[in-house]
Amino acid sequence: MQVEQDMIGAAISRIPSGCSILAAAHDDRRSGVLVSWVQQVAFDPPSIIVSLKRSRPIIELVDASQKFLLNVIGDHSTSTLEHFAKGFSVEEDAFEGLAFRTTGFGPIIESCIAHLKCEIRQKIPVGDHELYVAEITGAGVVDDAKPYIHIRKNGMSY
């Protein structure tokens, strides 16, 4: 059985993904989390899915506000990736030391190459994660930089 699990993990790790910062705000609190499971799922209306592990503190803000802002990391933005890789509670200021602009959806990080303003349309429990289906209601692109591409060492963990 373990051999099969190891093979599944190895095969899943070959699926490339990008990395983005999901930012959310509600009342006077805001936070951000590094996410790699994001995918476009519809043209009309333009929609994406994002998967968040249930233990992520930011879920509290996403569920309360029913929206989020997805900041797409460029292949040159390793410092932004490293900043958010350590994780933050909703009591910590995840954006301290970063250049950003505040929006009603969450902060736009200046070092990122694009952003998507998203409104939650559906939340689906999947294993140890929550899958959010969100409609894109606004967006921006900073430059023609390429997105960061992530390949995991093992498909059974981050």
Image (spheres, rainbow, N blue to C red):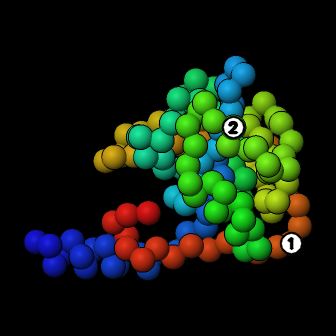
Q: Picture coordinates of residue 59 (x, y %)?
A: 52, 35
Q: Picture coordinates of residue 44 (x, y %)?
A: 68, 48
**Distance between the alpha carbons at the discs numbered 2 and 1:** 29 Å
Task: Indicate whether 7 appears above or below 18.
Answer: below
Q: Picture coordinates of residue 45 (x, y %)?
A: 68, 45
Dot 1: element: loop
- 35 and 11: which one is in front? 35
Picture residue at 89% right of the left edge, 67% below the top: 143
Is 100 displayed left or right of 30 in the figure?
right
Quadrant in the picture for the N terminus: bottom left
Picture residue at 55% right of the left edge, 37% below the top: 89
Answer with the quarter of the image where residue 142 lies.
Answer: bottom right
- 104 and 84: which one is in front? 84
Task: Indicate whether 39 appears above or below 138.
Answer: below
Mark 2 is on which residue type? Answer: Asp
Picture disc at residue 93: 2
Q: Can residue 113 be seen in this view?
A: yes
Between discs 2 and 1, the one toward the N terminus: 2
Picture disc at residue 144: 1
Is 103 displayed left or right of 26 in the figure?
right
Q: Picture coordinates of residue 150 (x, y %)?
A: 56, 73
Picture residue at 60% right of the left edge, 30% below the top: 91
Q: Which residue lies furthest to the top in this view?
A: 27
Number of numbered tags placed on the structure image: 2
